[in-house]
Image: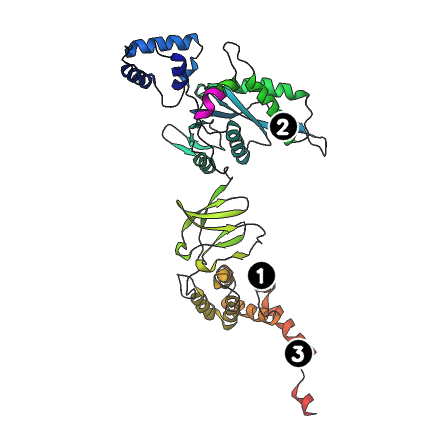
Amino acid sequence: MPDYAALSKSLAQPGVTMQLLWEEYVDVCRHNHQPYYRLTQFKRYFNDYLNKQSFTHVMKHKAGERVEVDWAGSKIRWIDPDTGEIIDGYLFVAVLPFSGYGFALGCYDMKQPSWINAHIQMFEYFQGVPIVTVPDNLKTGITKHTRTMLKINETYESMANHYHTIILPTRVRKPKDKPSVENTVKSLTTHIIARMRNYQCFGLDDYNEHLRKELDRFNQKPFQKKPGSRFSMFNDMERGVLQPLPTMPFEYCEYKTVKVYNNSHISYQKHHYSVPYQYIGQSLKLKIYARKIQVWDQDRMLCEHGTLSKMPGGYTTVAEHLPENSATHGQWNSQRYLKWARHIGPNVHLVVETMFSDGPEQRHYKRVHALLKLADTHSDSALNEACQHALERSATPGYRLIKQLLNAGTSHLKSSTSESPEQSFLRGADYYEQ
């Protein structure tokens, strides 16, 4: 007779079938010159053993194969230590269907950062990663789920790739696809939320500290109809078959599509960051972290920039990202802008020339382009006159000053600016002849 007690533990592991165990059993019997049962009898006695030992769950689930995740329907509460106000929060719940081992975490909201952080904390609590993660069809995780198409949120998918787990959401409006977590949500809601109603928690961290104690008590509670507990079953049969945790935990990031301007820069939160000039005019993917951004072209990272202490309107430029001869490179360059400015008027040309003389010319392309387009709204002569008055006021006039002068009216400015200096500072030739 095979050792079904040992074989039942092997059967619980991913990829192990009764057929495989029977073949290994036959090999051992042949090696020891012992008779063995045929496959049909082997399976019959095996099923009888599982039914008698209350191991029927082995037939439904594999150890470490999947984890089911969801939000609990009931809200959690804690007290704001500063105002005394009662704050409502949300409870993230997860369960390993094989052992029933559960996890719970209180969160401020159900937005994507909280959703991702709860998964990270869950994997740390399990000390491993299941092969499949089964969420519901919530918008923070699943963008689109139909019979013919499944689109997972980019951040959620990136987290799954980091932990080497497969996101396999339930079918829409099919709660029976995820019965384990539904039952555990009900049990945890009763066990944890009800037990914690008598705690006075001042802040979410305080709440989660007490929650962890109640969670451990829930997992260690003995089964009613079979020996052991969720914890003992997880520790003995499931912990060892989970995938190992990565070296570093996942760092939360968001995604955005950006276009590379003709000045070899992209814009994020009104600050400009350089990218290699070969990608001018193309759309690239931006991965946004807490303190940095990464620019990607499909699966290739092009560059990385820090985002701390960056002023709106400023430029962060890497010299290697710019072409060697910027003045003539690309469809839009300084030579083309200077030619355009010269066509409008000499004062406009002088202002544009002054702008380009200040640092890398690429950072001035946008403002120069906007400046020259003012001629379409007003006229070439009006813009040229406004540039003249701007040069009288400042050695390095900017777009904002010139636009203010145009909106105020150049004729009024001409009379006020021309008469004032002459009366105050200029003396005629007769004065010097005396």
Of pointers 2 and 1, the one earlier in the residue sequence:
2
Quarter of image, res 88 = top right
Q: Nearer the viewer, residue 358 or 195?
A: 195
Q: Secondary structure at mark 3?
A: helix
* Residue type marked 2: Glu
Q: Does the magenta segment cover residue 248? A: yes
- Of the numbered discs in the image, which one, if any, rests on residue 422? 3
Quadrant assignment for the N terminus: top left
Q: Secondary structure at mark 1?
A: helix
Q: Mark 2 sits on what residue?
A: 209
Please state the horizontal and vertical placement of residue 25, each as a whole percent of the image: 32, 16
Q: Residue at x 59, y 17 (%)?
A: 190
Calculate the distance from the C-alpha at mark 3 to the C-alpha at mark 1. Answer: 27 Å
User: Mark 2 Cα within 10 Å, few/some/many (few <14, many 20+)?
Assistant: few
* Residue type marked 3: Glu
Q: Mark 1 sits on what residue?
A: 400
Q: Nearer the viewer, residue 321 or 418?
A: 321
Q: Nearer the viewer, residue 13 or 316?
A: 13
Instruction: Give the magenta range.
Output: 235-251
Quarter of image, res 52 = top left
